[in-house]
């Protein structure tokens, strides 16, 4: 069967075009280090890539939220540990002040130290996180939790709202804390509830004026204050552990997702270099064949 020169010419042209397209695709893939240049190249893989990227973004967003929460818990822990130490010292001073052998001047000296410790507690109640947000104002994070009014009484400026964030499957942790939950009111035997700082001020006044019954009541109040703050400290520690555990899970999940995404999306550069070299050699060979076909005489071309 006679093969025409025009047929050979068309076939050579088509082969060179195909090889040039393949080489261009490989070079474009190498330029961006990606297997898929357009969704139409592989719709199934393109859909999988988008799905995985969306999941990675959700995981990253959740991780950022939990890391902010962890930083906040760390700041809370520092403040609450300091507050715990202060209350321990206040209890010691309260016991000393209740000693009947102490004179008026001795108790006044104790009251001075207690007043300084009370001011430290007030300062701790207005602690902030690394972003400048108040820790114990509920959701009013830009407002100082506590302040003193014109009469020197401590008032709470935050709200009672508790914000919770997800930390694992069907589990949440508290993100914002109300100052009145940390610096809780005390409830006395007569059923009367007294604010944290009000009770503390009454105790200091009782020590300063040597009122023994009021000092004894103050010691009972201090025990309640210490227990409540210790519980808040324990809760913060528990939330820290939960969040850190969930961060570890998220890190492992993110690594797995990114590895899967890389397998589908990223280019095997060594394989691509080898493929490009083969395509270049094939193109050179095709161009050589095309040159020979193009060299046929016009007479041979017309005769075919």
Image (cartoon, grey):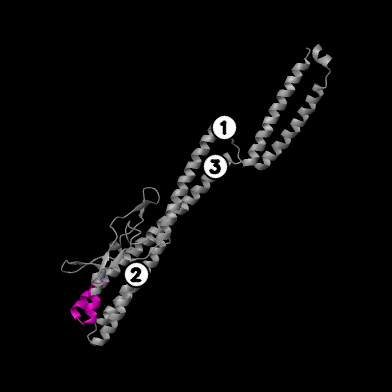
Residue 99 against residue 186 in the figure, above or below: below
Q: Which residue is mark 2?
A: 123
Q: Which residue is mark 1?
A: 42
Give the label, 2 or 1, closer to the camera: 2
**Mark 1–mark 3 distance (CA, rounded to whole Å):** 15 Å
Determine the residue located farthest toward the left in the rendered image: 190
Q: Which mark is residue 261?
A: 3
In this rendering, position of residue 112 left or right of residue 3: left
Residue drawn 78% across and 17% down? 5
**Mark 2–mark 3 distance (CA, rounded to whole Å):** 49 Å
Q: Position of residue 266 (x, y in %)?
A: 59, 41
Local packing at callout 3 (Cα closer than 10 Å; few below 14, some 14-19, many 20+) is some
Residue drawn 69% across and 33% down? 23
- Nearest the camera: 82 or 143? 143
Q: Is residue 294 magenta?
A: no
Q: Position of residue 275 (x, y in %)?
A: 69, 36
Residue stretch rendered in magenta on the structure:
202-221
Residue drawn 27% across and 86% down? 106
Q: Which mark is residue 164?
A: none
């Amino acid at each position: 069967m006679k093969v025409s020169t025009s047929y050979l010419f068309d076939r050579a042209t088509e082969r060179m075009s195909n090889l040039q397209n393949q080489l261009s695709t490989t070079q474009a893939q190498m330029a961006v280090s990606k297997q898929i240049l357009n969704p139409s190249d592989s719709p199934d893989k393109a859909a999988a890539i988008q799905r995985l990227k969306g999941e990675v973004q959700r995981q990253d967003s959740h991780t950022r939220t939990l890391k902010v929460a962890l930083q906040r818990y760390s700041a809370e822990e520092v403040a609450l540990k300091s507050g715990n130490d202060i209350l321990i010292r206040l209890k010691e001073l309260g016991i000393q002040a209740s000693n009947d052998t102490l004179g008026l001047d001795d108790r006044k000296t104790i009251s001075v130290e207690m007043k300084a410790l009370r001011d430290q507690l007030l300062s701790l109640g207005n602690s902030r996180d690394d972003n400048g947000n108040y820790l114990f104002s509920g959701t009013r994070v830009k407002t100082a939790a506590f302040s003193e009014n014109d009469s020197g009484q401590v008032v709470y400026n935050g709200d009672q709202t508790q914000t919770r964030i997800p930390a694992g499957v069907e589990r949440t942790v508290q993100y914002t804390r109300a100052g009145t939950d940390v610096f809780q009111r005390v409830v006395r035997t007569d059923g009367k509830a007294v604010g944290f700082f009000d009770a503390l001020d009454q105790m200091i006044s009782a020590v300063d004026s040597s009122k023994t019954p009021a000092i004894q009541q103050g010691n009972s109040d201090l025990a309640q204050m210490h227990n409540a703050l210790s519980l808040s400290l324990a809760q913060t520690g528990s939330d820290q552990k939960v969040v850190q555990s969930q961060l570890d899970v998220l890190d492992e999940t993110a690594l797995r997702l990114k590895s899967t995404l890389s397998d589908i999306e990223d280019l095997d550069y060594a394989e691509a270099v080898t493929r490009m070299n083969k395509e270049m050699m094939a193109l050179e060979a095709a161009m050589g064949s095309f040159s020979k076909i193009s060299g046929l005489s016009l007479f041979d071309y017309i005769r075919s």
